[in-house]
Image: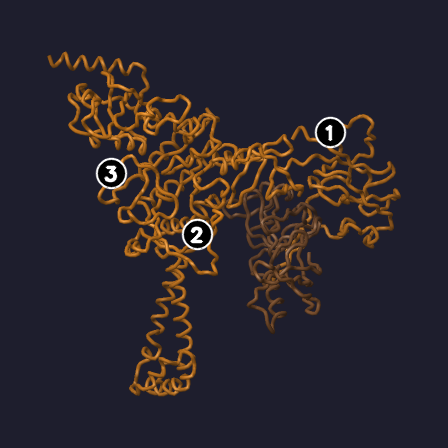
Amino acid sequence: MFYVKTLSHEIVLEPVHFGQKLRATLVRLLKEQVEGLALANYGYVVNVIEVPEDQIKSGVIEYDTGSVIFTVQYTALLLRPFIHEVLDAVVSQCNPLGFFAFVGPLRIFVSKHSMPEDMFNGFDGEKDAWISDDKEVVIASGSGVRLKIKGRTVEQGNITAIGTIKDNYLGLIDDGEAQGPV
Amino acid sequence: MTTENIVGFVELPSATDKLHCWKVRNGSSVRVGETIGLISKNANESGAGANTSNLEVSVVKSHKRPKRRMRPGDTVVATFEVTTTADSITTNSAVESASASEPKQDLCPLICSTDGILRIGRPPSTTEGQNSATIIGYIVKCLHPTVIEGLCAVCGNSMELLTSNKQAYSPEKVDDSVNMSRVTVAGVTVTISESEGQRMAEEDAERLRSQRKLSLVLDLDHTLVHATNDVRAQQYLHREDVRNLVLPMITVSESGHEQAMLKNNFWMQQHFVKLRPHVKEFLEMALALYEVGVYTAGTREYAEQITIMLARHLVGATRDQPDLEHLRYQVQSAESEFARHEAKSGGNTDQAHDADHADEQGNQAAETTDGKSRKRKRVTFTASKMDEKTDGVTAGKMAEMKQELEGVERLEAEAQEMRQKLFGSRVVSRTDVGDLGRDVKSLKRVFPCGGTMAVVVDDREDVWANAGEVAASTRKGEPPENLLLVRPYHWHRFVGYADVNNAAGFDLTRSQNEGDDESDEQLLWTSDILKRLHTRFYAKNTEDKDKTVADVLRSMRQEVLLGGSLVLSGLIPLHKQKGESNGPRPAVIRYAESLGAKVLPNVTSHTTHVVAAKDGTDKILAARQIPGCFVVKASWLMECIWTLKRSDEGKHLLGPPPQKKLADLPANDSDDDDDDDLVAELENELLNED
């Protein structure tokens, strides 16, 4: 889920930016570079909340290129999946092995083994949806589901998690006919 | 699952405890330290739920569903939830916050001791030393049926995949025991275990058999379409079968990996696509008898666009994506203009009055952004009609445009449906199987455990042959037997234009392009072959469950030139004539032998055909001495391969027809004494002549 943490980031500033607006440029560059990034153990940086400008120490000049490296501390709002956490997600794609759901930039895969027994064989190839035996629950692209995170991994700058809807009170919560936010 | 690997037990701490409730369901994965249930310490019988024995608690109740969000207008649906039992404790640390409906009990969490999958109930065989009264469940090892991005999809553990060798298409092992193979489903490449793959294969086979269909995997480029991104092709857009689409350009970065240009750069190029003749009939036939999928060497976007385009062609829609968007934009801007005019002029009553009125408003509207044209109109004081005022957008025209748009939108929706029905999610593109490399196609990616009911239609064989893993019956370096080769399709007008994706296959008849490619009948031929294959496969469906498509194709091929005896001339370079027995055979020999003919190095009296590249060789001269021996061009053999029928030799003669035509070789028998018959007939003819 979301949490706030103080992180630090190195910004390489080219000499063209030196001058009056140095700090403002630093803050802007920091936001551009860091927001949306998936950091290894921290999760996705959703937003940079605050950059205490007085805390930016002097930068170190790189001898080779002439650019200056600043180490900037900032507080960031992070999104990270925690194991055993229960989240609401939006289904993006169903396939015969399970379905993919997204919580913002976080991708979660729910395999058919992690679905309740009455949905195990319920993949409908024509409609690309998972349907329970009694036809009550239809999980298709755009539906909202409540799932529990079972594991996660970070690779290639993206975080993928594994989820389950097998436990009680997990599963479809939103039909997804209207474009509602998660 | 008969042999499950039990790694742990779920045990009550003492015999007097009672399980209050389970926190996880039967079959869920559990981890060390997870709370999987709550135990009540004091054996109070008046607990809500009145559980009399531990085993009764473990009776599997149906999955409880969460409360749905209400939408405006929803009626309250009778839900299957049981909301007010004591099991509605939602947090793990809720020992303290037990709901008020139950009497005070000490509830302790039941902690799991190992990772794995939980099974509730008595374990099948208890080893000695275990007190069976307190065992209420057991934990089995997770079999990791599906692994995605290094995580097991069931237990969520990071898997360290041990690859036997560093190639992308060899089976990987998990825990040294289970073979995992990569599979690409709906654009995602995941790794699945062998048993899972087998189960998928069985399910697919079930489904196909119940619908009496087979699986068909189609290539796109030069098989169904000819695509180019050369700008010169724009002049042909007026034709019904030439379409255009817009795709982002692909560049190859220094590291050698392909990257699509970011859409922000707007570096989108227009591509022009010519559909092969008869593609509509082909797809319609395929739809009825086969479950169709696509495996292309193009990118994912390319594959998606082409499939929609094919669907549109089937439905009869002619406007493609760029046209459609343009039309929408036109209608939208016309609508907004019209609405503005309607609002300003307020009706159609008095033309003169309106003219002045409009003039005034034209003056006022001079400052607005769209007032430029009206500024000019200000000058006209005549009783101008409404038409001119609204820049030609009348109610009538509006209605027309709207209708047109509606019609087009409806067709588009139909096309989308058709695409779903035709291809579903069975589209595999180069970007999906990027790790295989550019020139490799592997059937294993689509059908990890089987492919026995699949046919592939492609103009290139080498990409399929390059795959490391092929079926056991295929010789190394040769394409699989369920591959149906088709003649590569080049539209003559597009010849010389750049190719979009990979090049076309090798065409032995390369100098033989017909003047107008509209006479290309390959798709009709292939469609006929597929129909025959389907009929044969399902002819005796009760008998042979193990019959594979490859077998049926092989027997179909063997019948084509059975009894034929071929000599090749000028087609195989000397160094390949040695004939390694284990290596791949040269293509021509392979074709001839798969069609049931024998290939001999020299002309004998039994020779029925000499397939030659050019006239005048020794072998040809020798062959002309033999009555009934046809001297044909290589195109004859290729046509036999492409149609799976014995082609008419007369169309492919190289030089004069043979002397003294004998009766045609029997096409469908498989007698062993064919050759004897031939000799006997030859003798008879000679005798009769004398």
Quadrant where the N terminus of chain B lies?
Answer: top right
Mark 1 residue type: Pro
Is there one chain holding both mark 2 and mark 3? yes
Residue A18 placement (x, y as % from top left): 59, 69
Is there one chain holding both mark 2 and mark 1? yes
Task: Give residue A36's quadrant in the image.
Answer: bottom right
* Chain A shade in the render: brown
- Lower sequence index among marks 3 and 1: 1
**The label number, if any, that marks residue B124 in the structure image:** 1
Q: Which residue is mark 2?
A: B250
- Lower sequence index among marks 2 and 3: 2
Q: Residues within 10 Å of mark 1 (few under 14, many from 20)?
A: few
Tell us which disc is closer to us: 2 or 1. Answer: 2
Who's the residue at 27% across and 25% down the image?
B568
Give me the C-alpha separation between circle 2 and circle 1. 58 Å
Residue B351 placement (x, y as % from top left): 33, 84
Q: Is residue A130 above or below residue A10?
A: above
Tell us which disc is closer to us: 3 or 1. Answer: 3
Q: Which residue is mark 3?
A: B511
> Element type at marker 2?
strand
Give me the C-alpha separation between circle 3 and circle 1. 72 Å
Give me the C-alpha separation between circle 2 and circle 3. 32 Å
